Image (cartoon, coloured by chain):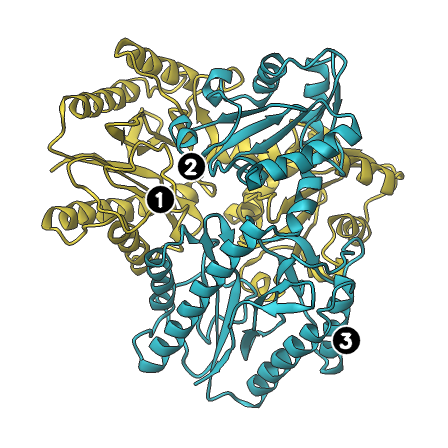
Chain colours: A yellow, B cyan
């Protein structure tokens, strides 16, 4: 049994427990859901329908699906005029779903769309809920399986190689601008076999590092001059992401020195809390308390799960409703940062894998003192 | 009165007509809505609340907001623990919205979230509907104003300069790989003052051009060798996008020659239909009929509006519910394409602006015969 089949089994266990006869996943513009790739290998726009024993993939690009997708049936989205409401009716027919069955649509389905579904399919019990099969899949995806961990380790290894080269090239003066850094990562990631970067690289020299996410993401401006420069990037290998942030520090003033020290301290403190059974919110609260002591404030979450999405469960943040418990197989980043409109910003982000005995830091991002 | 104010006036006219006292816009990960930038200039993650006379922006990055945003009030998202449901309560208080008022939340709000809103704010009439203020804004945004048209013309001019350079560099052999082409666009766009590319460049050499959207988007593979190579890219200038696709043809076989001829013919035929008052679906049907005559099928839409989003209203496609009527100020692409698993793909995409007297083709993408 391959990994996709093992994942499908888990989804079907849930479906049976919940009395669901058909579930629909949607991965289209504005409604991304990489669970379709997780279950079928198909990396592009598609709908996926699962019954208790069969799967039907409805891809936008049928040629791509023939190369990548594992599914019992494949029908081009075009055959349904690229309309989800037509496709779901087609799936009911193709998979032989009996009248009166419980059909689950994605929890992100808008309220107006939900009304349409129920009025168009009165013969079925259409459900749309927060704790859906799709969100159950996101919970399952938190715990990476052996195939995923192997890919993630490889992706982290490439990320580390690129971090070392970035440091070398900044020190030697080969990388002088934000563009130099961003382009280097784009090219090197592909040379190393990655699909590319998982999100737009954020390269911000001292004049622009005050932004949590620099805007624009990178420019032709100088990088790594006096002060604080932030470089936030991730690689995507066979669908799986890494996410790291380096800060380059040159001739810091007293404020900048303090900011960098605080961030390094925060990373160490957070790592000490990486113990199976600990609540993620506890990590975030611990770091928030450290920041408060320095009369600073973390203006973003402390970290987030990583996998087929650059941001996925668990979220590590100090917010009601963000309760997760650390478990072996979880893969996530921690990224404490501090930002000042005058002195710029400093962030340090690495990726951690929880293991049976503790944790491993898979990436080697660091504050680089020039 | 500046353009943002004129746009706000239009939104408020609608609000008053619909009896809405507070409207919420959301531009966050997974729920992008560039209408916030259109109304306030703020380019990053944020919520925006409008009452009949005041606006409240709730940005994730307060430092960025201070640089870009025009809004009566600005409160950091952090003050609401980065929770939309806390922020809306804060907005009600800050903007003095009376109990019993009609409050509109985005039409993309999921059904489970909608239930939460109504149960958490029973004192208000919370509405979530397809024909929302947010979708009304998308309709207004279809007709570009003078400020937008000026930016779009400039963006198209830069796009054309880059198209010429791409042709020159492919002919001279300076661009040999997909990566060469993609990186050239990334760098050149920034040199010319753009924020960057509006979406990930798709560069597919002859071995990969069969994909509608090549996967991965670009690699180190050869580009512009024997057969069909597709290059689909767009620039973003001050938030506004262009979107063009070139096909490079070298030593085509009979099939490839036919495909390229068909696409060129489709572009001409579609352009003949660009007459104010024509229905966009009519354009798509006309081109579909041409493809059918050649026993081919267009597997994607014919075109789409462009603006702050790379894909926005009007959509030009042969599908029920896609009825728009061409009007002066509309800016959109037309992109007929044909794909074959053996012979590769060919697509040609340009951007058109409807004017009082007809239309202008703002971009100069072409099939380049090498």
Q: What element carries label 1?
A: loop
Q: Pointer 2: what residue?
A: A306
Q: Nearer the viewer, mark 2 or mark 1?
A: 1
3 and 2 marks on the same chain: no
> Do the residues under discs 2 and 1 have CB atoms within 8 angstroms?
yes
Q: Say which chain tag 2 marks.
A: A
Q: Say which chain tag 1 marks.
A: A
Q: Nearer the viewer, residue B23 or B348?
A: B23
Q: Is mark 3 on a helix, strand or loop?
A: helix
| Vertical position of residue A250 compared to residue B112: above or below | below
| Vertical position of residue A155 compared to residue B213: above or below | above
Q: Which of A217 and A96 is in front in this view?
A: A217
Q: Nearer the viewer, residue A251 or B158?
A: B158
| Vertical position of residue A113 compared to residue B53: above or below | below
| Vertical position of residue A344 compared to residue A295: above or below | below
Residue B196, disc? none
A311 relative to B48 in the view: left or right: left
Residue A329 visible to an observer of this rendering: no
Q: Pointer 3: what residue?
A: B289
Residue A234, disc? 1
């Amino acid at each position: 049994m391959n990994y996709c089949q093992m994942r499908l089994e888990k989804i079907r266990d849930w479906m049976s427990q919940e009395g669901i006869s058909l579930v629909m996943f949607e991965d289209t513009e504005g409604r991304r859901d990489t669970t379709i790739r997780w279950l079928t290998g198909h990396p592009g726009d598609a709908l996926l329908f699962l019954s208790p024993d069969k799967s039907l993939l409805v891809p936008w690009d049928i040629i791509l699906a023939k190369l990548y997708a594992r599914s019992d049936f494949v029908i081009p989205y075009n055959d349904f005029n690229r309309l989800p409401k037509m496709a779901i009716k087609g799936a009911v027919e193709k998979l032989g779903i009996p009248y009166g069955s419980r059909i689950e649509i994605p929890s992100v389905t808008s309220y107006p769309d939900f009304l349409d579904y129920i009025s168009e399919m009165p013969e079925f019990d259409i459900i749309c809920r927060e704790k859906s099969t799709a969100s159950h899949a996101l919970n399952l995806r938190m715990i990476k399986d052996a195939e995923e961990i192997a890919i993630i380790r490889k992706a982290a290894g490439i990320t580390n190689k690129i971090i070392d080269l970035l440091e070398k090239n900044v020190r030697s003066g080969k990388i002088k601008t934000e563009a130099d850094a961003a382009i280097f990562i784009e090219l090197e990631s592909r040379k190393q076999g990655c699909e590319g970067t998982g999100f737009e690289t954020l390269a911000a020299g001292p004049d622009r590092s005050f932004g949590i996410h620099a805007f624009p993401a990178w420019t032709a401006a100088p990088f790594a001059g006096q002060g604080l420069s932030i470089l936030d990037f991730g690689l995507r290998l066979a669908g799986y992401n890494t996410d790291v942030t380096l800060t380059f520090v040159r001739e810091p003033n007293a404020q900048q020195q303090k900011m960098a020290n605080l961030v390094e301290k925060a990373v160490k403190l957070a790592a000490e809390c990486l113990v199976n059974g600990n609540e993620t919110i506890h990590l975030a609260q611990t770091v928030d308390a450290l920041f408060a002591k320095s009369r600073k404030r973390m203006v973003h979450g402390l970290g987030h799960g990583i996998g087929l999405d650059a941001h996925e469960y668990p979220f590590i943040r100090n917010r009601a409703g963000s309760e997760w418990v650390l478990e072996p197989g979880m893969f996530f980043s921690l990224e404490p940062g501090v930002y000042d409109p005058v002195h710029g910003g400093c962030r340090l982000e690495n990726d951690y894998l929880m293991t049976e005995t503790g944790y491993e830091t898979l990436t080697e991002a660091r504050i680089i003192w020039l």
